[in-house]
């Protein structure tokens, strides 16, 4: 890529940018041996492929429709992109023999009550779990759900929750994991929409929140954030905070501070791809004391 005069992005190791007279004319995103090329003019893309084929044997799949198990659909008239993992979710359902499961409207019960104390401790409990699981590998199922969060921010919190019990899974955890899969079956046709903002602006808007001592075992709070760029949800997270907060205000402030670091990275990335942020990034929080402290 360097030989072809591309610049390696600072914010993302997989991104390469080609500049000409101070303007970006081509962007290439690389993941192992998969490559996505973006440019306004088709001839420039063809020329890049020809140059690349001089050093590597390549397969040209044409306009992007699938990338890493994610289906891409374009609505050019409305400047929209739809990201969908329906085919991937069907594969998970087939793999774990859950194609005919009951459809559920929520990822998990609000008062799920999951705790490390529900892990099997005695041989009889281990045998009960073994009989209940019918050969389902818990880590394999959790890993499959983790990849589904690429287009389903609505299950991020719950998958993060069930992943914490992977060391010694029990029946309640597997039931919760299957519950998430039933929800995905109901919503598998839903797509994540990347929108188009008017007047050429690409603004960042962020929402952040935290519960207080939400983890019943460690009393650590769980923080989360979502970033919108140009009216499209592009970045989200749900994690346990590393230290125990002594108040709700502290828990919310820690979540706000963490999301601010991610906002700095996102602003850096957007600047590199030609959309520098001239205004401050808007942050939404729902605790008045935290807002006043910030």
Image: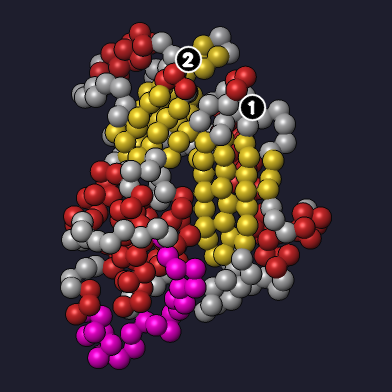
Magenta-span inclusion, residue 112: yes
Q: Which residue is drawn at 67% across and 65% down?
A: 251
Q: Is residue 242 above or below residue 156?
A: below
Q: Quadrant of residue 81?
A: top left
144 or 22: nearer the eye? Answer: 144
Magenta-span inclusion, residue 123: yes
Q: Residue at x 47, y 22 (%)?
A: 78
Residue hosting label 2: 25
266 or 159: nearer the eye? Answer: 159
Circle nearer the N terminus (1, 2):
2
Q: Which mark is residue 276?
A: 1
Q: Regarding mark 2 in the picture, which secondary structure is present there?
A: strand
Q: In which quarter of the image is residue 21?
A: top right
Side of 26 relative to 224 (left or right) = left
Q: Is residue 64 above or below residue 185?
A: above
Q: In this view, does 176 lie above or below 282?
A: below
Which contiguous range is marked in magenta? 107-130
């Amino acid at each position: 890529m360097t030989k072809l005069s591309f610049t390696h992005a600072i914010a993302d190791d997989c991104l390469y940018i080609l500049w000409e007279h101070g303007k970006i004319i081509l962007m290439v995103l690389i993941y192992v041996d998969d490559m996505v090329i973006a440019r306004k003019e088709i001839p420039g893309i063809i020329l890049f492929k020809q140059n690349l084929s001089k050093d590597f044997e390549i397969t040209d799949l044409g306009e992007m429709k699938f990338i890493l198990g994610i289906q891409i659909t374009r609505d050019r008239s409305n400047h929209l992109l739809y990201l969908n993992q329906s085919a991937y979710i069907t594969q998970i359902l087939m793999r774990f023999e859950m194609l005919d499961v009951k459809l559920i409207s929520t990822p998990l019960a609000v008062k799920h009550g999951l705790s490390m104390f529900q892990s099997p401790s005695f041989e009889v409990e281990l045998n009960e779990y073994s009989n209940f699981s019918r050969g389902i590998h818990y880590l394999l199922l959790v890993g499959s759900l983790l990849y589904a969060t690429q287009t389903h921010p609505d299950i991020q919190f719950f998958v993060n929750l069930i992943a914490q019990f992977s060391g010694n899974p029990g029946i309640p955890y597997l039931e919760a994991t299957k519950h998430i899969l039933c929800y995905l079956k109901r919503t598998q046709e839903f797509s994540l929409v990347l929108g188009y903002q008017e007047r050429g602006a690409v603004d960042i808007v962020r929402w952040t929140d935290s519960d207080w001592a939400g983890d019943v075992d460690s009393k650590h709070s769980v923080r989360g954030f979502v970033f919108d760029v140009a009216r499209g949800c592009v970045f989200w997270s749900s994690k346990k905070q590393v230290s125990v907060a002594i108040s709700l205000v502290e828990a919310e402030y820690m979540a706000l501070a963490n999301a601010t670091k991610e906002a700095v990275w996102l602003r850096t990335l957007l600047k590199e791809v030609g959309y520098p942020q001239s205004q401050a990034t808007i942050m939404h929080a729902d605790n008045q004391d935290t807002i006043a402290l910030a």
